Image: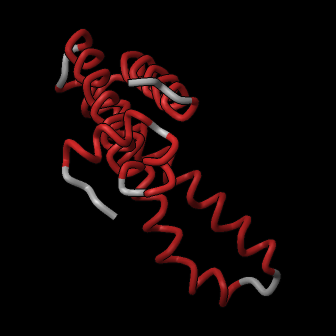
Amino acid sequence: MQLQVADYVFLLAATLFVIAGLFRGLSGFFAFVAALVASTVVSISLWPLICLSFADVFVRGAVAAVGAIIVFGIVRFLVKFILRKIISQPSDSIVGMVFALLLSVALLYVASASAIVREHSALSTLLSHHLGLTL
């Protein structure tokens, strides 16, 4: 199997995910995901109220972005604080690294569903044949 440029890009991204997962840990990973979901839900939920309150489109976007950032920060802090109390540090880092590796494999799986990616990536082609993905 000859690796192509897309494969090296994927391997570099996977390596960066694993290193970040090692330092961020499982608590940081879950805190990031929870904060991302919470900030998105709050921004979407409050968008009609923001549209009624502000006429300028730029101001609407700025208010939604600032609100999302504030919610993101609060939720991330709370989730990370709670999970750090539950999970001890060495296992937190190791499990975070494993979850980051699983995230990398999931991204490769999603990329394998695209015929364009399969055409330019030996790893994606191998995974799609192994999983029986045909498009």
Q: Residue at point 31% right, 36% down? A: 105
Q: Quadrant of residue 65?
A: bottom right
Question: Foreground: 101 or 68?
Answer: 101
**Residue placed farthest to the top in the image?**
90
Residue at the spot 41% in from the left edge and 47% down from the top edge: 75
Q: Residue at x 37, y 49 (%)?
A: 112
Q: Position of residue 71 (x, y in %)?
A: 50, 54
Of residue 111 and residue 48, the one placed in the foreground of this image is: 111
Is residue 100 in view?
yes
The vertical placement of 54 against 110, above or below, is: below
Whether residue 21 is situated above or below residue 56 in the rendered picture = above
Q: Quadrant of the C terminus?
A: bottom left
In which quadrant of the rendered image does the N terminus lie?
top left
How many discs mark residues in the rendered view? 0
User: What residue appears at the point 33 percent right and 23 percent down from the top-left corner?
Assistant: 25
Q: Position of residue 78 (x, y in %)?
A: 36, 40
Q: In the rendered view, does 119 fall on the left or right side of 112? A: right
Quarter of the image for residue 60 reads bottom right
Q: How is the image coloured?
A: secondary structure
Tell me where residue 58 appears, x and y as whole percent: 81, 72
Which residue sits furthest bottom?
A: 52
